[in-house]
Amino acid sequence: MKTLSLVIPVYNEERTLRNIVSEVIEKIKSDEINLELVLVDDCSSDNSLKIAKEIASEIPFVKVFHHEKNQGKGAALKTGFMNATGDYIGIQDADLEYDPKDYLKLLKPLLEDKADVVYGSRYLKRDTRRILYFWHTFMNKGLTLLTNMYTNLDITDMETCYKLFKREVIQEIAPNLKENRFGFEPEVTIYVSKGKYRLYECAISYNPRTFEEGKKIGAKDGLRALYCIFHYGGHVAPVPMQILLYLFIGGVSAIANILFFMIFNHYKMDLVYSVWFAFIISAMINYFLCIAILFRHKARWTTFGEIVSYIITLIIMGALDYICTYGLIFVGLSSFWSKTISSLIGVVGNFVLRKYFVFQEKTKK
């Protein structure tokens, strides 16, 4: 018999915790599937921890873990993943939005050894659904689309709670997870895509809660998820997507370069200083954005080597920027257009040098 471990993150769920545990046991445990429930209380301020411990004292296959400080759903899941012992490890929220019997469908591709990871999708065809928030659904589908673009996957519901993994898969991924809140969803999906695991989807039912009923995700979590897609997925995205993302980085840097150059020029600063100071400021902005959302992961160099290599690119691109700007002004173009053209050339040159020199990834041996 195979064992299914379900990790249940708990934060102020005293009203529903007993119900969800009972429902999971009733709908999943059978003569064919052993069950393990891992409850992780994330420093609840209500009676959730007390109820969880009472449940564990009554049911031998229930484990309880507790965070002394509230860290977020992602942190609770990581704790659960590393302490689960089942052959397959899934996620079950402590509310009643999802139907645990759907795990029997998610298990099928794993039991048949067709998949390593199975996602339950709320957007695959099903008979009926509860209608609630347009913008919540729009955000989910938009983040899923962007994740697909950066991972080259074709999933329909990246933000789904129901994710089921072979134990060795999620326990290989879990130590690398950094996101403590809802950024977990895109982060773990990107790691699944990087690991080339066999990924399946199946339709699941979904009964969403309103915010009045206790739903916790909000707009700031959507923005964080967007950042996570860039931050964890940018460096492994298909090259066209990397170029698009760098166009944003380069565009912001180029605008800063032009803006500061015009400011310095307006205050009658010497041309040489105007060019170099504007370039240095834009280069700092470029570097910050690069390490924040595109090239930072698994850098080939040590920190010192990375700084040296970046300084070399600054010298190369700074010299090119100065020569282009000064040369175009010399042949009669205005200061604005001279700087604009040299900045566009800098966008292309910087992308090539950042990707293949400064932030070149380590070669796997």
Image (cartoon, rainbow, N blue to C red):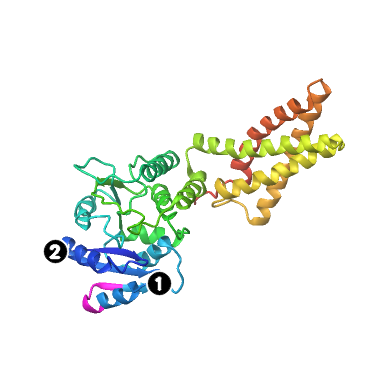
Q: Secondary structure at mark 2?
A: loop
Kind of residue at disc 2: Ser
Residue under circle 2? 30
Q: Secondary structure at mark 1?
A: loop
Residue 45, numbered label:
1
Q: Which residues are magenta?
A: 57-63
**63, 132: nearer the viewer:** 132
Q: Position of residue 147 (x, y in %)?
A: 42, 43
Report the residue at 35% width, 45% height from top: 133
Q: Is residue 349 magenta?
A: no
**Picture quadrant of residue 315:** top right
**Picture quadrant of residue 246:** top right
Report the residue at 81% width, 20% height from top: 332
Q: Position of residue 102 (x, y in %)?
A: 21, 53
Report the residue at 83% width, 23% height from top: 330
Q: Is residue 276 left or right of residue 114?
A: right
